[in-house]
Image: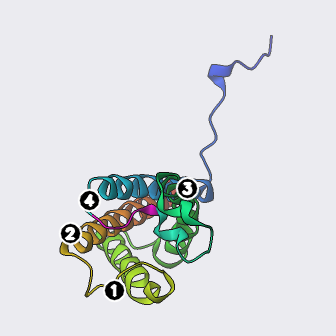
Protein backbone atom coordinates (compact mmCIF):
# COMPACT_ATOMS: atom_id res chain seq x y z
CA UNK A 1 0.00 0.00 0.00
CA UNK A 2 2.83 2.33 -0.83
CA UNK A 3 0.78 4.57 -3.04
CA UNK A 4 1.70 8.23 -3.48
CA UNK A 5 -1.30 10.43 -2.96
CA UNK A 6 -1.62 13.78 -4.67
CA UNK A 7 -1.87 15.53 -1.31
CA UNK A 8 1.42 14.04 -0.14
CA UNK A 9 3.43 15.31 -3.09
CA UNK A 10 5.47 18.44 -2.58
CA UNK A 11 5.14 21.14 -5.17
CA UNK A 12 8.32 22.16 -6.91
CA UNK A 13 8.91 25.92 -6.80
CA UNK A 14 8.80 27.73 -10.12
CA UNK A 15 12.21 28.46 -11.61
CA UNK A 16 13.47 32.04 -11.38
CA UNK A 17 13.70 32.39 -15.18
CA UNK A 18 10.07 31.35 -15.52
CA UNK A 19 9.08 33.96 -12.97
CA UNK A 20 11.03 36.63 -14.88
CA UNK A 21 9.17 35.67 -18.07
CA UNK A 22 5.81 35.93 -16.29
CA UNK A 23 6.71 39.20 -14.59
CA UNK A 24 7.85 40.68 -17.90
CA UNK A 25 4.81 39.47 -19.82
CA UNK A 26 2.22 40.61 -17.29
CA UNK A 27 4.06 43.86 -16.58
CA UNK A 28 4.01 44.69 -20.28
CA UNK A 29 0.42 43.56 -20.64
CA UNK A 30 -0.83 45.63 -17.70
CA UNK A 31 1.12 48.75 -18.59
CA UNK A 32 0.13 48.63 -22.26
CA UNK A 33 -3.53 48.12 -21.29
CA UNK A 34 -3.21 51.19 -19.07
CA UNK A 35 -1.65 52.96 -22.05
CA UNK A 36 -4.58 51.90 -24.23
CA UNK A 37 -6.99 53.18 -21.59
CA UNK A 38 -5.05 56.48 -21.45
CA UNK A 39 -5.09 56.78 -25.24
CA UNK A 40 -8.80 55.96 -25.45
CA UNK A 41 -9.66 58.68 -22.92
CA UNK A 42 -7.25 61.17 -24.57
CA UNK A 43 -4.72 61.40 -21.76
CA UNK A 44 -2.08 60.63 -24.41
CA UNK A 45 -1.97 61.30 -28.13
CA UNK A 46 -0.46 57.87 -28.83
CA UNK A 47 -1.31 54.37 -27.74
CA UNK A 48 0.39 50.98 -27.60
CA UNK A 49 0.50 50.86 -31.42
CA UNK A 50 3.44 53.26 -31.08
CA UNK A 51 5.68 50.19 -30.97
CA UNK A 52 4.51 49.25 -34.49
CA UNK A 53 5.10 52.67 -36.08
CA UNK A 54 8.72 52.17 -37.22
CA UNK A 55 7.62 49.34 -39.55
CA UNK A 56 5.62 49.82 -42.73
CA UNK A 57 2.71 47.54 -41.97
CA UNK A 58 -0.15 49.56 -43.43
CA UNK A 59 -2.72 51.97 -42.10
CA UNK A 60 -4.36 49.40 -39.83
CA UNK A 61 -1.71 50.30 -37.21
CA UNK A 62 -3.67 53.44 -36.34
CA UNK A 63 -6.94 51.56 -35.73
CA UNK A 64 -7.99 49.80 -32.56
CA UNK A 65 -6.82 46.54 -34.11
CA UNK A 66 -3.36 48.11 -34.32
CA UNK A 67 -3.64 49.22 -30.70
CA UNK A 68 -4.57 45.67 -29.68
CA UNK A 69 -1.65 44.20 -31.61
CA UNK A 70 0.55 46.84 -29.96
CA UNK A 71 -0.59 45.60 -26.54
CA UNK A 72 0.41 42.04 -27.47
CA UNK A 73 3.77 43.11 -28.92
CA UNK A 74 4.60 45.18 -25.84
CA UNK A 75 3.77 42.22 -23.60
CA UNK A 76 6.20 40.01 -25.53
CA UNK A 77 8.96 42.65 -25.82
CA UNK A 78 8.58 43.26 -22.10
CA UNK A 79 9.92 39.76 -21.44
CA UNK A 80 13.26 40.86 -22.94
CA UNK A 81 13.17 44.06 -20.89
CA UNK A 82 12.55 42.02 -17.73
CA UNK A 83 15.62 39.89 -18.47
CA UNK A 84 17.67 43.04 -19.02
CA UNK A 85 16.57 44.24 -15.58
CA UNK A 86 17.38 40.82 -14.14
CA UNK A 87 20.90 40.87 -15.58
CA UNK A 88 21.61 44.44 -14.49
CA UNK A 89 19.76 45.16 -11.26
CA UNK A 90 18.24 42.02 -9.73
CA UNK A 91 20.32 42.32 -6.56
CA UNK A 92 19.19 45.88 -5.85
CA UNK A 93 16.34 45.46 -3.40
CA UNK A 94 14.81 48.92 -3.47
CA UNK A 95 11.90 50.41 -5.32
CA UNK A 96 14.05 53.30 -6.56
CA UNK A 97 16.00 51.03 -8.90
CA UNK A 98 12.75 50.11 -10.65
CA UNK A 99 11.63 53.74 -10.76
CA UNK A 100 14.98 54.75 -12.26
CA UNK A 101 14.78 51.87 -14.73
CA UNK A 102 11.34 53.03 -15.86
CA UNK A 103 12.57 56.62 -16.22
CA UNK A 104 15.56 55.39 -18.24
CA UNK A 105 13.24 53.42 -20.54
CA UNK A 106 11.13 56.55 -21.05
CA UNK A 107 14.23 58.55 -21.99
CA UNK A 108 15.32 55.82 -24.40
CA UNK A 109 11.90 55.67 -26.10
CA UNK A 110 11.15 59.41 -26.28
CA UNK A 111 14.62 60.84 -26.84
CA UNK A 112 16.79 58.16 -28.46
CA UNK A 113 14.19 56.19 -30.45
CA UNK A 114 12.04 59.22 -31.27
CA UNK A 115 13.62 59.90 -34.71
CA UNK A 116 12.81 56.33 -35.76
CA UNK A 117 9.13 56.52 -34.80
CA UNK A 118 7.13 58.30 -37.49
CA UNK A 119 4.29 60.44 -36.20
CA UNK A 120 5.68 60.78 -32.69
CA UNK A 121 6.27 64.41 -31.78
CA UNK A 122 9.43 65.42 -30.01
CA UNK A 123 9.25 65.81 -26.25
CA UNK A 124 9.29 69.59 -26.59
CA UNK A 125 6.25 69.49 -28.93
CA UNK A 126 4.26 66.93 -26.97
CA UNK A 127 1.38 68.07 -24.80
CA UNK A 128 1.77 68.11 -21.05
CA UNK A 129 -0.90 65.42 -20.62
CA UNK A 130 0.93 63.01 -22.92
CA UNK A 131 4.24 63.70 -21.21
CA UNK A 132 2.98 63.26 -17.65
CA UNK A 133 0.85 60.22 -18.44
CA UNK A 134 3.51 58.40 -20.46
CA UNK A 135 6.22 59.18 -17.91
CA UNK A 136 3.97 57.93 -15.10
CA UNK A 137 3.20 54.72 -17.00
CA UNK A 138 6.90 54.06 -17.60
CA UNK A 139 7.68 54.74 -13.93
CA UNK A 140 4.95 52.32 -12.81
CA UNK A 141 6.10 49.75 -15.34
CA UNK A 142 9.71 49.99 -14.16
CA UNK A 143 8.59 49.82 -10.54
CA UNK A 144 6.52 46.68 -11.19
CA UNK A 145 9.26 44.92 -13.16
CA UNK A 146 12.07 46.01 -10.89
CA UNK A 147 10.54 45.38 -7.53
CA UNK A 148 8.98 42.07 -8.59
CA UNK A 149 12.25 40.70 -9.97
CA UNK A 150 14.29 41.92 -7.00
CA UNK A 151 11.74 40.45 -4.58
CA UNK A 152 11.82 37.06 -6.33
CA UNK A 153 15.63 37.15 -6.36
CA UNK A 154 15.70 37.80 -2.60
CA UNK A 155 13.12 35.04 -1.97
CA UNK A 156 15.13 32.59 -4.03
CA UNK A 157 18.30 33.29 -2.07
CA UNK A 158 16.50 32.99 1.26
CA UNK A 159 15.27 29.50 0.30
CA UNK A 160 18.80 28.35 -0.55
Sort mark 4 into few (<14), some (14-19) or many (20+) by Cα contacts within 10 Å. Answer: few
Residue holding disc 1? 122
Circle 2 or circle 4, nearest the eye: 4
- Residue 77: mark in rendering: none
Residue 37 placed where, x, y %?
33, 52
The range drawn in magenta is 44-48
User: Is 17 placed left or right of 40 in the picture?
Assistant: right
Nearest the eye: 28 or 86:
28
> Which residue is at a point 48% across and 56% down the rendered structure image?
63
Q: CA distance from mark 1 to mark 4?
A: 18 Å
Q: Earlier in the sequence, mark 3 or mark 1?
A: 3
Q: CA distance from mark 3 to mark 2?
A: 24 Å
Q: CA distance from mark 1 to mark 2?
A: 14 Å
Q: How is the image coloured?
A: rainbow
Residue holding disc 3? 69
User: Which residue in the rendered view is the most extreme toward the left?
Assistant: 128
**Residue 124 falls in which quadrant of the image?**
bottom left
Q: Earlier in the sequence, mark 2 or mark 4?
A: 4
Q: Earlier in the sequence, mark 4 or mark 3?
A: 4
Is 138 situated above or below 112?
above
- Report if residue 160 is visible in the image: no
**Residue 1 falls in which quadrant of the image?**
top right
Residue holding disc 2? 129
Nearest the eye: 6 or 131:
131
Amino acid sequence: MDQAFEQNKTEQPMKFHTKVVLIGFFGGLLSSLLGLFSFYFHFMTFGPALILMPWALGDWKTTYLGQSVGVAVIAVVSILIAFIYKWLLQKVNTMWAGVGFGALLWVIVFYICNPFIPGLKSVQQMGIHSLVTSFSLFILYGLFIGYSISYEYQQQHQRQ
